[in-house]
Each structure stands twice: as C-alpha cells, then as structure tokens.
Image (cartoon, rainbow, N blue to C red):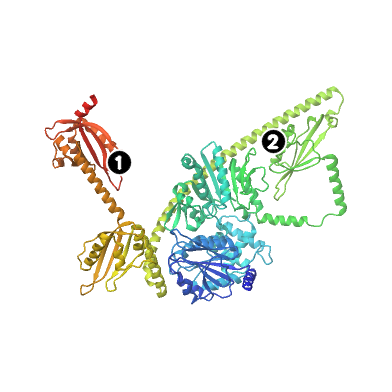
Amino acid sequence: MSNRVNSNINSAIKRPDLTVVGVGASAGGLEALQSMLSNLPTDTNMAFVVAQHLSPSYKSMMVDLLEKCSTIPITSATDNEVLEPNHAYICPPNYNVEITSGDRINLISYTEARRTPRPSVDMLFESIASVKGESAIGIVLSGTGTDGSRGIRAIKGENGFGIVQDPSDAKYDGMPNSAINSGNVDLIVQSTEIGTELKNIMHFPRRRSIDDENAISRDTYNGIINILKKQCKVDFTLYKESTIVRRIDRRMTSIRVHDTEMYLQHLKNHKEEVNLLFNDMLIGVTSFFRDARAFDRLDRELSSYIQNKDTKELRIWCVGCSTGEEPYSIAIILSQILGDKIDDYKIQIFATDIDKNAIEFARNAVYPESALQNLPKPIREKFFIVNDEQFELTKAIKSHVIFSVHDINNDPPFLRLDLITCRNLMIYFTVELQRQILPTFHYALNPKGILMLGQSESIGVFQEQYRPLSKTSKIYEALFVGKQLPPERKSGGIKKKAVDYKEQSVREAPRRSKLNEEFSTLISKSLKEFVLPNAILVNENQDIIFTEGDNKLLVRPSGLPTNNIFKNLHPQLAVDLRSAFHHLNNGKEIANTGFQSFNLDGNDVWVKLILISIKREGPLGSLILIFSQIEEPVNIPILSGEETDTTNQAVLIEQQRLLLKTKEQLQNVIEELETSNEEMQSMNEELQSSNEELQSSNEELETTNEELQSTNEELQTAYAELSMAYEEREHQRAELEALRNDLQHTNGLLEDAEKSAKMGSWLWDISTRKIEWSNGCYLLFGLDKEVFHPSYEAFIGLAQDHFRARLEEQLTNLLHSKAVQPFIFEAYDSDKKTIIISLDAVVSFNDLKQAERVMGTMTDVTESILSEREQTLYKDKISYILNSSLNAACVIDLKTMSIEYINTEFYKLFGYSIESLNSFKGESFYELIDPEDKISFITVMQNVIDSKPGQAIPSSYQVVSGKDGISIPVYANHTIYEVDESTLAASKVLITLFSSKSYTELEES
C-alpha cells in the first residue's frame, strides 16, 4: 500500500506540465467523441475530461460505449481523483465537474431541479482555465444550445487553446456555431483530425518572452503593432510587450507558422488573421462580484458616499467592462443600497470596452447558469429571470447601464463621475500608460469620488491625488488638489523607446578623461557649498520630491502632511513663486522671483528664488530645480550706499519694482483664467456633442440588437424543429441510448405529475391475477414499494371494512362492462388515516370478448370530497335556519342580479313567490326597490361586496310590495353568502329583512 502511495506521489511530482483538455458535447456528441477518441495519439501527455449533457436519472453507459473504440483508457470521473496523462474521464449524470489545484477532479451534485444541461461545459472550461493557464485546451463538439462558448473565452483569456468541431461535420451544430460566433476559437477541424492537431500543438515551439533568443525582432514587432493600429484603429504601443508577444505566439501556433517575419507577411496578406489576432488581444476574464470581499467594502463605501451626497444623481464608469458582469454587479449593489428610493435617483453606469463583441454580449444581459454559480440565491431570485435555459437580468437593472465601445488610451473620459472601476486592466499596460490613465481618472472624478482598482494594481506615485479607503480592496478616494486641468496625453511608442536605447548607449559611451571629471566635480561642489547651497526638486504636480541643504525658507505646515511646494515654503514667497512657475510653463527654461525683503530668524534679509526647468523622460517626468539666494542688505548694490537720499531712492525704486511685479502677476492670472474659461467652454460643448452622438448610437445599437434577438429566436425555433426531424436517423446504438434516456425522463415526468396530482396508475393482468402499481399509487397509501407487494387480495384489504365488498363488486362489474365510474371508496393509509380514493379503469378484451387486462388510475380526492360534504352541510344548515327564521330572508345572485332563494316569511311580508321574482333580473331587479332608495341600496350592496365574509352590513330602505305595489319600509342586514372560488370575490349576498315599523317602535321604547 505504501509503495503505491509513493508511486502516486512520484508520478504527480514528475508531471508539472500536464495539459488538461476539456471536452464538451451534447446531442450527437457520442459519434463525435467516438471519432475523436479513436484517432487520439497515446503520447500527448494530456488528460481529457469529458462533460456531455446527460439525463440526471439515467445510468450512463458512456464509458462502456467509448472504451471499445478509444486509443487511451477511459474511466468514470470520481471526486478528488488525480488526473493522469493520456487518460480520459467521463463526468457522471446529474453532476458538474471542475478541475482544482493539484490536477484533481471536483464533482458537484445538485438536489434541486435543473434549468440548464448538466454537466456544464462552461464550468469545466472556466475551472481548467483558472488552474492550468497556458496548459488549458477546450474542445467543443456536436450539440444544441450555447454551452461552452463562455468557457472557451476563459481558456483563451489565460493563453490556452480553443478547438471546435467543424459544424458541417457535427450532427448538431448549435454548440460549435455558438463557440465560433464568439470569436474565441483557434482551430475549426473535423472530429477525426482533433488528435493530430493536439499533437501539433504540443510539439510546436512556443516563445515565452520578447527577450528570449530567437524571439521577435523590434522591427517585426513594430510592424505587427502598426498593422493592428491601421486596420483595427487601436494602438497597442503602450501595452506590455510580454502580453502582446504571448498573443502573437499563440496565433502563430494556431496556424503553424514558425518564423515571426513570415507571420508579419501573413498578416499583410490576410486581413481575417489581423481580426483574429485583435480578438486574442482583447480577451478578458470577469464574473459577477469578482472578489466578494472587495465588493462588500465597495458596498459600504458607496452607502456612505450616497448619504453624504447633496444631489440625487449618480454617474459611474466601468472601464474594461468585458462581458458586463462588473457594471451589472454595481447596479445590483445600488439597488440594494437605495431600495424603494432608487426611482428618485438618476443613475448612469457607463460601461465601456474596446471589444465590440463583448459589448454586444453584455448589452443582451443574458448569461448561462455557470456565470451565476457563486451568486447568493436571494440575488439570483430577485435580479434574474429564467430565459429558456439561461438567466436574464431584470429590466430595472439593465436600464441603469449604458454600454459603448471606448478606448481608454485615446478616447476622452466621461466627466463628473462618482465612481470609476478599472479592475485588472492596467496590468496589461506599461508604466508610462498607467501614469497617463490615473491622472485622467482623477480629472474625471468628483472630489471625494471613489476609484476601485484590481488586486494587482495600485495608484503608484499619485499619492497626492488619492487617499486609500481600503488598501486590501484597492479602493481609493479622489482628493481635491486645487485647479483641475485635463491631463496631457503623451504619444508613446516604439520609436521613442528606440531613441531611449540610443541615448542609453550614448550615456554608456566612454567618459571624458579623469582630469576633466575632477575639475567638473570640484566646480559643482564649490557652487553647491558657497554660492547656491540650498536646492529643491519639484515634480510636475508641484510636489517636493527632494531637498538638499539646510533651507530656512522651508516650513512644515500644521494639519495633514503634504509635499506641495506652496504649503511648505515661506508664505511671503508664494505669489512670486507662482508667477515664476507661469513663466516656465510658457516655455522659459529659467526664471527668478527677484529679490524680496522680509524678516528671517530676526534678521532683515533679501531673498530670491531661481527656478530651472529640467526636461527628462521616464517615470518622474519633467522636474523643476529651485535654488534660494539669501543676501544681507549690504550685499544688495542699490542699498549699499550710506547717504539718506540714496537709501530713500532705493526704497522708492524697490516699491516701484514690486508694484510692476504685482501688475504683471495680476495680468498673468487674468489671462490664465480667460484661457481656462475658453478651454472649459469649448470642452463642455464638445463633450455634450459627443455624449449626444453616443446616446444616439446606443439607441440605434439597441434597436438593431432587439431585431437580431428576434431573428435569433426564430432561428432557434427552426433549429429545434430540424433537430427533432433528424433524431430518427440516429445510429442504432445511439438510438438505443436516446430511447433509454427518453424513457427515464418520461418516467420522471410521470412521477412528478402523479405526485403533484395525488394520483397513481395501476395494471391488472386477469390471467395471472398480477397487479402492478406506479410510484404514485405507493405515495397515495404511504407504502414502501420494497415491503408492500400489490395483489388482488392486498388491494381489497386496503379498503375500509364497509367498502371492501363494494370494491370487489366494482372490479367484477368492470370485467363484465357493468361498472359505473368513477367509483369512490374509503381506505386507510400507512398511518391508519382515512383517505378517499376515486377509481377509474379501462378494460381491454380479446377477440372472444374476454377481459385480458384492466388499466386504471387511483386519485386521492379526500380534500375535494370533504370540502363538498362540508359545503353541502353548511348550505343545509343555512337553509334550515332561514326557513325556520321569523324574519324575511332572500339570497341575491350578483352575476345575474336576481333573487334565487326566499323563505316563507319573505313571501308573507312582501307577497312575492320565487316564480314571480324571475322577471326581476338585471336592471329590472331595482324595480323591487323604491326609486328614492335605489342609490342608497346600490351603495349598500357595494359595501357588502367590499366587506369580509361573515361581516354584517346594516341598512334601511323601502321595498315595493308585490300585493298592492305599496313601498314597505324595512331594516335589513346584508352579508356575503357565497364567494367565487376562482376570483375570491363575493358572488351571492344574503339579506334578512325586518319591518321598519316594529324597528321604530323598539327605538322609541
């Protein structure tokens, strides 16, 4: 035993690169699987996991049918089993199969009724993608529906391979066509050729990095990027090269091209390959509430944000929304936060992505069951409706989300946003592109707006613009940093990088002679020590990033710490410093503030700041170097004289200089404000125009989508009809399999129908006196089919004593065609409780008119019989009470508005018989009421209709006598007599009447 365990451990250690192949199939999949498995190589180092839709109650024979023709061993999958190379595993019925870490099988059983086929191909593919990454392959074979399309996308998102059986080779092309239409397929081949393609994939050389030997050259890489930019209008220059190279490498493997230059030429000659490569670039993996803890924290932060928000307008931007799960998750969160108040808010969730196919899918808001597997049941029941075999979001959620195609690298952002989510998108961008996008997000967000990033992303160097709300969930708050200007977009690219490489090579060239270096170092050291000892480095955001020397002009402000130069410098220098910054922004390379007099540490000094602009590439961007020059008054030439006149003249000149500087600064501020206002006005007009065009495009796309959806439904219906027509051509073994599945399914439906209808079917063979029961019969009597064996005597014994002889007589009469049906009898169940059974039967006779067998049903009618008995008894009691009452009484049918019953006292009081009242129907009924009291009577009847059963409504009015036509004043009580079972509304009203004269006498007494 221990040796076997050790061998298993060793085998697991020796195969770290096991490739897992998921195979999905449905109708017609047996033939496709046989063709594929019979042509598989035996040395692929791959493990095959098959998920074929099967009936949940049928004992599958898939293993027996497939192992006869397969070239590799085939077994039924068991839970927690470790996958072995060159083996195939078949998922059992009514289970979903997944692959977990360690290459183990995880079987998931379900007790509730299913709405979608099982096992789910999507769930299998998605688990393989998450565990195996590049070592994942998905194969979609013959079948109906769309299962597998979503899983293929997940596999390709992890750089795996997607293979589909050629629809012309598939018996049912629904699943293959759906996968192909998703744009996530690498190979489309016949089932007999799949084994050959798998072997080619395993032996084809794959590059892992652009830095590898024999990797793609810079010129070839640039050429591919330029082709993508020209044809697809998307620039991948600032995307991470490692990601782009992996996508290129996979496409080369798919079409079996070894040389990158050949592949570049192939792209130039085949535009369809450019589209395939472009689609590979865009594949993203997402899910509802991905990273539940992060969304729980977002829920709390959004709740707090909405409570503190002054307006009832929420604008949210989901960047890189892929197939739409993330924006819909946020819409669900908002619905839960706002509850019934959601209609009071104007909510706009802008969901954007560069992938047109993903946007179209997201706009439909229809997802397979596998997409909802991790959602809590209350969310699924509240926000999703069943649409065929898939789940569709409710209109209330869909109405808040607006989808559009948008390139974050080039297109302008949405503005005035309360929340931006950009999760697991920037990991594909270079640092340069990330440093352009994060300021764009800050510009688009409202102050205190929320930014949510992915788990592997952060705000980097932009600490001054964002405050972390949750470091673990990567949720940040946008800080107000003063004047907000649109961030500049820098066009980076390969050319710039080529220049960087050249500059780097120049920098790494041989240095000057050692003597020159020493002289240069001596000069720099002396200048720093004696002339300009204090230096400050400031970035483009006017934040201090480095200081040198003991600078007395720097102060540390109270409150939250900040590195802003204006907050940390002596306040008297702030105005002049801002003016100097303005000069540098206008193109000057050096600027100064001029000398300014103020008291520093108790001494009167003159201070001047010298600003030098430093242009540089790289993550720090452009910098500004600030030197501070502090001089005693004696060192200022104009103040060095001793005469009073000279001093006064110097003061006058200094005041004039300050006045001119102030005017200049004021003029600069005015010009900046005017320019800024004009730019903002122009930008607002452009954005408004763009938004209107975008809205119009969205409406047109939604209309087109609805038409396509309608056409798709018609095609689905036509396809279903064709599928039924082709079922008769099933191969003999496949036909036997289908018939068994159908029989099991039919038996299941019959059992469910019998259980819900409280009935069962039975068969009596006259010649053998053998009686067979369905499961419904056992359920009627609460009997265990393993213990109770139905027979003629046992059946008679179930009836109560006084019904046994009648039951035997009924069975005998059935054989002679003398029985009256249905036959009702009372019996005992297993708990000795009385149940009432209705027996129906049909007898089949032979040619000699002799009974051969009796087929019938038994139905539990206990509730209906008892209800009828109680209702009859109730009406008998009412009739007895009314006939023995001393008061007049009648029953009015509200449907025909006529009197259907009167008692003796009614006839005595008013002189009407029940026959004479037949003419008072409909509108004529009100002729019985004095015209002055007609409206009062109608009001009373309406009150009775609105009342509860048993509630008495009193009133008084005059009834026209049938004897002499005189109106008789009466006091009456009105109550509901009968209720319509279908509508639960009053159908009949009981009225008891008293002579008002006697009532008046009682009042007076």
Q: Is residue 124 visible?
A: yes
Quarter of the picture holding the N terminus: bottom right
Give the residue displayed 23% in from the left and 43% down from the top. 878
Query: Dot 2 corresponds to which residue?
Result: 559
User: Hey, which quadrant is residue 908 in on the image?
Assistant: top left
Query: Dot 1 corresponds to which residue?
Result: 949
- Vertical position of residue 171 compared to residue 495: above or below: below
User: Hey, which quadrant is residue 309 in on the image?
Assistant: top right
Circle 1 — which element? Answer: loop
Circle 2 — which element? Answer: loop
From the top left corner, tell me how far across and down residue 117 is, in percent: 45, 62
Q: Nearer the viewer, residue 269 or 263?
A: 263
Q: Which mark is residue 34?
A: none
Q: Disc 1 residue type?
A: Pro
Quarter of the picture holding the C terminus: top left
Q: Disc 2 residue type?
A: Gly
Give the residue displayed 86% in from the left and 27% down from the top. 641
How many marks the image carries: the answer is 2
User: Hey, which quadrant is residue 236 in on the image?
Assistant: bottom right
From the top left corner, tell me how far across and down residue 354 is, in percent: 55, 53
Which residue is outermost to the front? Answer: 801
From the top left corner, tell me how far across and down residue 426 is, in percent: 61, 52
Q: Nearer the viewer, residue 860 or 249?
A: 860
- Vertical position of residue 15 compared to residue 609: above or below: below
Question: If you read the primary sequence from the N terminus, does the residue marked by circle 2 or circle 1 appear first?
Answer: 2
